[in-house]
Image (cartoon, helix red, strand yellow):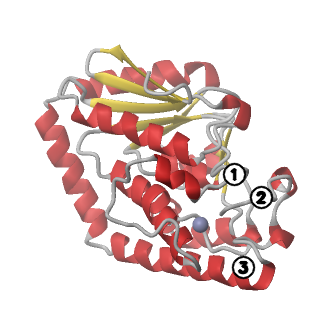
Amino acid sequence: MTNETILYDTPMPGIARIVLNRPETRNAQDTAFLYALNDAFDRAAHDDEVKVIVLSANGPHFSSGHDLREVDAHGNMRKHATVSTWGGFGKPGAEAQFAREQEIYLGFSERWRNIPKPTMALVHGKVMIGGLMLMWPCDIVIASEDAEFLDHSVAMGVGGAEFFAHPWEMGVRKAKEFLFTADWIGAREAHRLGMLNHVVPRAELESFGLAMAGRIAQKPLFALRLVKQAVNSAQDVQGRVSAMQTSFALHHLAHAHNWLAHGRSVDPGGVMPAIKKHDKAAD
Ligand code: ZN
C-alpha cells in the first residue's frame, strides 16, 4: 500500500495491481491522489519482477475526474516533489495553472502512457473527463457492461480534457460528436469504436483482466517493452504528441478566457448539475 487513496499489491507473479481507493468521492483526483498514483506506477515500473501493471478502482465508479473541490490546489503542489522540469506553481496570471496541469494532468498521463511495460485498465461505472486520462494511457482497456464514458469539458467552456487522446481513441468524427454533445457513451459503443479491448460482465471484470495479464506476463519482459515502444512509435510518428501539445495550448487559452470572462477557469453556465456544488473549482 502506497497511500490510503491508492492501493498496491501483487495478486499474481509478474503482475502489480494499483487500485483507486477514494470511493466516497467517486475516485475524484486531487493533487495528492495523482502523486500517490504516480508513485504507484513508478514502483511497478521500477520493479523488475513486474511485467504487467493493472489499474482498477474501488467503489461504484472508476473515476469522476479531477477533484474540483480541492482547496488551494495550486498551493498543494508545494507538498510534492515534481517529476517534470516545469515550475512556477505559485506564479500569477495563467502561469500557475498551466504549470500545474502540465505536470499532473498532461504530464502524468503522458508519463504513464510511456511506461515501458504493458499496462491494463479495468474500468466500471462512470468514467468522466479526467477519468479518461487515467484509462487512455493504459495499453489494454477492459470495461464492464455498466461502464459509461463522458467528456463534458466543452459544456464548461473548455475544449476537451488535458490529455487530448480523443481523436486517437474513437476516431475523428465520433470524437467531435462526443465533445460537441457531451453525451455519455456506453461500453458497447466504446467497444465498437475501438476504445476498449473487451466488454465483460461486472462480476467477471477482475478475473478476465487478471487472466489476460497472466498470459501477457508469461512473455519475456524485454520483448514486451520493445513491442510496446514499436506500437507507440507508430502512433507518435502520425503526430500524436504535437497534436496534444496544440490541444493543451488551446485548452489553456480557454481557461484564461474563462478567468477573464467569468472569474473562474470554467464557464459556470455550462457546469453540469452533478458537479455544480463544486463551485470552488481550481480547474
Ligand atoms: Zn484544465
For the residues bearing labels 3 and 1, Cβ distance under 8 angstroms: no
For the residues bearing labels 1 and 2, Cβ distance under 8 angstroms: yes
Q: Which residue is mark 1?
A: 71
**Ligand 1 in which quarter:** bottom right
* Residue name at image x 52 percent, y 73 percent: 91
Instruction: Please tell me which residue lies in front, 148 or 254.
Output: 254
* 281 relative position to 224: left or right: right
Q: Which amino acid type is shown beneath numbered disc 2?
A: Lys
Instruction: Please tell me which residue lies in front, 80 or 11.
Output: 80
Residue 30 percent location from the top left of the image: 60, 46
| Gap between marks 3 and 1 measured at Cα | 19 Å
* Residue name at image x 80 percent, y 54 percent: 278
Q: Which amino acid type is shown beneath numbered disc 1?
A: Val
Considering the numbered disc 3 on the image, is that residue within a helix, a strand or a loop?
A: helix
Residue 8, picture quadrant: top left
Tally of numbered tags: 3
| Gap between marks 1 and 2 measured at Cα | 7 Å
Considering the numbered disc 1 on the image, is that residue within a helix, a strand or a loop?
A: loop
Please tell me how crowded label 3 is: few (under 14), some (14-19), or many (20+) other residues with Cα within 10 Å: some
Q: Which mark is residue 179?
A: none
Instruction: Please tell me which residue lies in front, 240 or 89.
Output: 89
Q: Which mark is residue 258?
A: 3
Could you tell me if residue 186 is visible in this image? yes
Q: Which amino acid type is shown beneath numbered disc 3?
A: Asn
Q: Nearer the viewer, mark 3 or mark 1?
A: 1
Q: Which residue is mark 2?
A: 280
Query: Which callout, 1 or 2, points at the residue further toward the start of the chain?
Result: 1
Residue 92 percent location from the top left of the image: 57, 77
For the residues bearing labels 3 and 2, Cβ distance under 8 angstroms: no
Please tell me how crowded label 2 is: few (under 14), some (14-19), or many (20+) other residues with Cα within 10 Å: few
| Gap between marks 3 and 2 measured at Cα | 14 Å
Q: Nearer the viewer, mark 3 or mark 2?
A: 2
